[in-house]
Image (cartoon, rainbow, N blue to C red):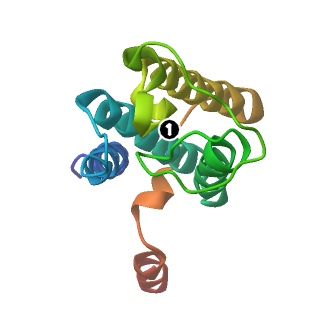
Amino acid sequence: EGLNFRPLTRRIALMLAVLFSSMLFGLGHAVNPEATVISTIGLFLTGIFYGLSYVLTGELALPIGFHIAWNFFENSVFGFPVSGEDLGASFIGMLQRGPVLLTGGAFGPEAGLFGIGAHLVAILAVLVWVRLYRGKIILLEELAEPDLRKRDSERSN
């Protein structure tokens, strides 16, 4: 009869999609003011976090909500720059001090080791949450097949 590699290819497709979109997310921010290699790596990890949030839950609202919340709290609440851009007034005026390597400097927290650590913790938190909620950590392979293809394959069966 042959071997069925479809589940394996779906899993690989999802992992490649997360990696590729994360690279684009990091590189897309690399042209921002004050960008560094560390900010690009940090934003690549942010992309991994957003991508995993989607492919592990199937909920697009989760990464969108996380992205909006991060940017809002980073600038509008705490007054940090967002990806090298100062977006205006904030609720709390903070004076950022310390080594740029740790704090991210004028680019913002995601360009520093503290920000990278926060994103690694966020990735771990999503994995733990999915494990507690679903009982196991699995990629939702059905996300690799667009709805239009599903409808066509369902009609042919």
Where does the image place residue 88, in percent across and percent down from the top left?
60, 56
Name the one closer to the observer, 90 or 9. Answer: 90
Residue at position x 67%, y 31% from top? 94
Q: How many marks?
A: 1
For label 1, the SS is helix
**Residue occupied by mark 1:** 49
> Going 51% across and 18% down the picture, which residue do you hit?
114
For residue 124, which quarter of the picture?
top right
Query: What is the x, y in percent for residue 100?
Result: 39, 20
Q: Which residue is drawn at 50% across and 31% down?
A: 109
> In the image, what residue type sits under mark 1?
Phe
Does residue 135 appear anywhere in the picture?
A: no
- 31 sits left or right of 77 in the view: left
Which residue is drawn at the image coordinates 49% and 58% (left, top)? 142
Residue 156 or residue 151, whichever sits in front: 151
Q: Residue 98 in the image: x percent, y percent?
A: 49, 13
* Residue 114 in sight from this viewpoint: yes
Can you tell which quarter of the image residue 35 is in? top left
Q: Position of residue 20 (x, y in %)?
A: 27, 49
Q: In this view, does 4 lie to the left or right of 112?
A: left
Q: Judge from the rendering whether residue 8 lies leftward or rightward of residue 96; answer left or right.
A: left
